[in-house]
Image (cartoon, rainbow, N blue to C red):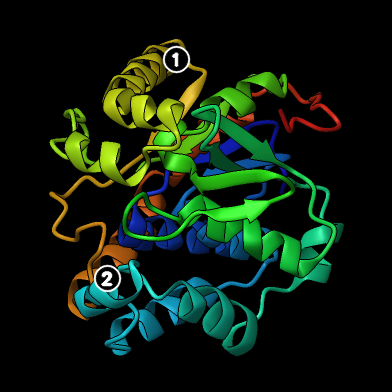
Amino acid sequence: MKYNANLVLEGGGMRGAYTAGVLDFFHDQGIEFPLVTSTSSAALVGSSYIAKQRGRNYKILEQIWKNSQSISFLRMLQHKELFSMDFIFNTLSNDSFPIDFDTLSKTPTKFVIGTTDMNTGKPFYFDHYETKSDLLNLIRASCSLPVLAPSVSYKNKELMDGGISDAIPINPSIASGTPKHVVVLTRNQGYVKKPSNLHWLFKRVFKDYPNFINLLKTRHNLYNQTMQMLLKMEQQGEVFIIQPQKPLKASRIERNKDKLRLLYMQGYEEAENKLKDLQRFLKNSDQSYYFQDNISS
């Protein structure tokens, strides 16, 4: 059943295993949304949900933890990327477990991927994908963490991790005009982002992108402000939050199979535990909805 509420997905690297569990539960319950906004690893996880490929995310996770080259500090020294982006986005996402682009492109659900424009230091959203290659390139861009992965060139733009400029993409969801939003977070309740202590490194690596450097310096403020807005919207009945209830043990670059498996199961089980509350939230939504033809900006 498609409800008149949007779905907003936070990234978080390998903590996306939690989101994968939540979305597989939604799939099993037939819960769909008119609009799904995503950023960073949530773009990869969200694409499987939109394409109705239940279990695809878990299969990709399995291969990442089984392959020693998927996350490698040696690779970081040799190729300037911690994650093997070709392995994740070519071998796994395209060859081994290809996205069902036909289903994704024909679904009435609008899928938004948030990226960061390095020249402006602002978020740039995409909601139209002409080819599967187009889609995978934008997911890759949204997952390209500063310093840990190279940027992606796309249509005269230099793009990086969407989570830098808009970690929880609630704004494009609000802009759609839909009154309610289900938000899946990958941090525990009460998390407050702190300033990075790597500003000296950012100034060296991204010296040609002053706006991007400034964004990296202040992104913690953006994140914390967004969280405050979400909590206020939650109190007003406009937002329903699903987030890890147990203390997180998996990191952004986690490769421990037991931790990732448990995090996936935690996401599934906690979504299941919240089902009745979620259904009440969704059933109280107005039945008419509107969303713009194109929100790319």
Badge number at residue 193? none
**Near-viewer residue (159 or 64):** 159
Measuring 39% from the left and 60% from the top, which residue is drawn there?
Answer: 149
Q: Residue 135 location in percent, x, y? A: 70, 60
Q: Residue 49 location in percent, x, y? A: 61, 61
Q: Secondary structure at mark 1?
A: helix
Query: Which residue bears the numbered disc 2?
Result: 76
Residue 30 seen from this side: no
Query: Which residue bears the numbered disc 1?
Result: 233
| Residue type, numbered disc 1 | Met
Answer with the quarter of the image where residue 222 lies.
Answer: top left
Report how far apart the C-alphas of labels 2 and 1 lie in the structure: 40 Å
Answer with the quarter of the image where residue 236 lies.
Answer: top left
| Residue type, numbered disc 2 | Met
Residue 90 seen from this side: yes
Answer with the quarter of the image where residue 243 lies.
Answer: top left
- Against 116, residue 142 (above or below) is below
How many labels, in total? 2
Q: Residue 151 location in percent, x, y? A: 50, 54
Measuring 27% from the left and 27% from the top, which residue is drawn there?
Answer: 217
